[in-house]
Image: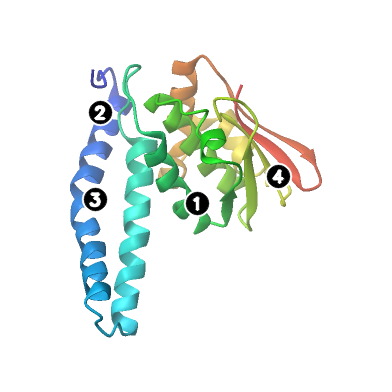
Amino acid sequence: MGAVMSGPRDLAGLVASRICHDLISPVGALGNGMELIDASGGDIGEELELIRSCSDAARFALTYMRIAFGAAGPEDTVDPAETMAAARPYLAAKRLTLSGTEGETEGGGDRSRLRAKARLLTLLAAVDAAPRGATAIPLDADALIWAVTGASLNSDTPIERLAAPESCGAREAHYPVLHDVARNLGRTPFAEARGPERFEIGLR
């Protein structure tokens, strides 16, 4: 069953899903073209290497955003491996490393698309909280609570935005969406310092 549209943010989710769906194919085709050049033994110069790098970055971002911001109903599912494949390279480019096995990080294989959205949106908040880089470790079976190590909590953005998501701008759109997802899951977003270089963030 698909997501049921019930308000402006649901409509925004459907629009995001459609945009990402349409853009992933041509961007993926660029990557496939680069693979064909590699396979043919072609000489890849700096220009083509730049195209490959940009293609990969765009593909990772679109896949991540499609899951994080796309529409998701209570019965919608997503392959945990797809979520992981999107999350690791996209977050690595933002200096956030995911620790743990794929099963641990994906909530033991939970296929709920709503929970997948919650994980990816929470990790975007973790990037804001540790802009200079850190490692995120899942603390619960659903991978909805994360310990972030190697960085102190930058409380200016995450805590303020988690407390008042209605004041967020376009670059902080993940906060109000995370609040909506948390409400649907019966949870509350939080971010708390646990030491000089460790904090926890997620839904409880």
**Label 1, label 3: how many angstroms apart (C-alpha)?**
18 Å
Q: Nearer the viewer, residue 163 or 149?
A: 149
Colour scheme in use: rainbow
Q: Earlier in the sequence, mark 2 or mark 1?
A: 2
The local crowd at label 4, few if under 14, some if 14 to 19, many if 20 or more residues have their Cα within 10 Å, is: many
Q: Residue at x 23, y 62 (%)?
A: 32
**Few, some or many residues within 10 Å of mark 3 (<14, 14–19, 20+):** some
State the image coordinates of residue 187 (x, y, percent, origin top left). 55, 18
Determine whether 172 is above or below 60 in the image: above
Q: Pick the quarter of the image with the C terminus.
A: top right
Secondary structure state at the residue bearing disc 3:
helix
Q: In whole angstroms, how far apart are the C-alphas of marks 4 and 1?
A: 17 Å
Mark 4 and mark 2: span between their CA atoms? Answer: 33 Å
Marked residue nearer the N-terminal end (3 or 2): 2
**Which residue in the rendered view is the most extreme toward the right?**
196
Question: Mark 4 touching mark 2, by CB under 8 A?
Answer: no
Q: Nearest the camera: 187 or 143?
A: 143
Q: Secondary structure at mark 1?
A: helix
Circle 4 — which element?
Answer: loop
Disc number placed over residue 24 in the picture, else none? 3
Is 65 placed above or below 107 here?
Answer: below
- Amino acid on which the number 1 mark rests in the picture: Leu
Residue at 32%, 27% (x, y): give it: 9
Q: Are marks 4 and 1 in contact (CB under 8 Å)?
A: no
Q: Which residue is mark 4?
A: 153
Q: Amino acid at mark 4?
A: Leu
Mark 2 element type:
helix
Which labelled disc corresponds to residue 91? 1
Quadrant location of the N terminus in the rendered image: top left
Label 2 sits on residue: 11
Q: Identity of the amino acid at label 3? A: Ile
